[in-house]
Image (cartoon, rainbow, N blue to C red):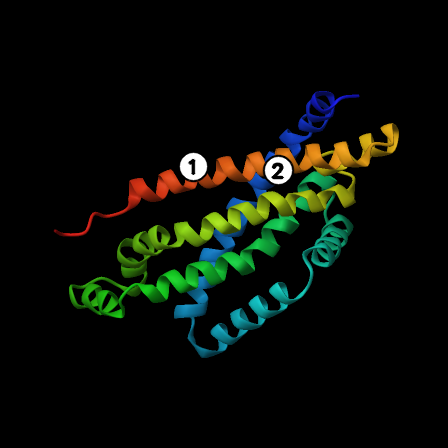
Amino acid sequence: MNFSSFIQYIASGTAYTLGVTLVALPSGLVLGVLFALLYVYGGRVVSRLMSLYSTVMRGIPPIVLLFILYFVMSGSVNLSPFWAGSISLGIISSAYQMEIVRGAILAVSGEQMLAARAIGMSTLEAIRYVILPQTLRLAIPPWSNEAAIVIKDSSLVYALGVPEILRRAQLISASTQQPFLAYISAAVIYFALVFIANRLLARLERRLTIPSNP
């Protein structure tokens, strides 16, 4: 087999890689936003719990957490390896996305919350209409890095038997005895996915940037 044949075979696993990413990244974002709001506005006890969650989740290798969460979920809910792995990666990513969103919230001036409350908004209304829109805009640059990380971490579900890019590279490496070409092909595909994702998010960031006053 030549390099082109390797690329074609391994690229057929791209749908699984994209599927895992499209489940893990948004679910991690939803949880991350919720946890970040609890971290900043939830009071001392809740903030400490969120800090502990972040420390634990970011202090354990993702593959270890993936196995723990996978076997917990597969033991209590009948989920396929694809769904269990994707949801597990979303939970893992939520800790990192929580820190991204928390930093963006803290970058928004605290005076804006005071101003929103002063004109009669409740705390929830101020968060929804004043704080969150600015927060999500500020979070796009670091979130782009997290998107790239999740795309690459999607390769971890190969350990659960999901036939994504790395799993196919492993299979073709074993059958052809050409591991270099197999894994180089996988690396090229991962690079292309990350590059495209970064370009799309950079374009989104430019579109959402508020022009500064001259």
- Residue drawn 52% across and 69% down? 50
Local secondary structure at mark 2: helix
* Residue 160: x %, y % from top left: 77, 44
Q: Quadrant of the N terminus?
A: top right
- The residue closer to the viewer here, 91 or 152, is 152
Q: Is residue 109 left or right of residue 71?
A: left
- State the residue lying farthest toward the left: 214
The residue labelled by disc 1 is 200
* Residue 210: x %, y % from top left: 23, 48
- The residue closer to the viewer here, 146 or 47, is 146
Q: Is residue 177 left or right of residue 88?
A: right
Query: What crowding class fits label 1: few (fewer than 14 Cα within 10 Å), some (14-19), or many (20 or more)?
Result: few
- Residue drawn 65% across and 44% down? 154
* Residue 77: x %, y % from top left: 72, 47
- Above or below — where is 45 with respect to 21? below
- The residue closer to the viewer here, 83 or 156, is 156
- Above or below — where is 57 with respect to 69? below
**Residue 84 seen:** no
In the rendered image, which quarter is residue 186 located in?
Answer: top right
- Above or below — where is 138 with respect to 50? above
Q: Amino acid at mark 2?
A: Tyr
* Residue 171: x %, y % from top left: 82, 33
**Residue 53 seen:** yes
- State the residue lying farthest toward the bottom: 44
Local secondary structure at mark 1: helix
The residue labelled by disc 2 is 190
Q: Is residue 135 left or right of residue 7?
A: left
- Residue drawn 18% across and 64% down? 120
- The residue closer to the viewer here, 141 or 103, is 141
Q: Amino acid at mark 1?
A: Leu
Query: What crowding class fits label 2: few (fewer than 14 Cα within 10 Å), some (14-19), or many (20 or more)?
Result: many
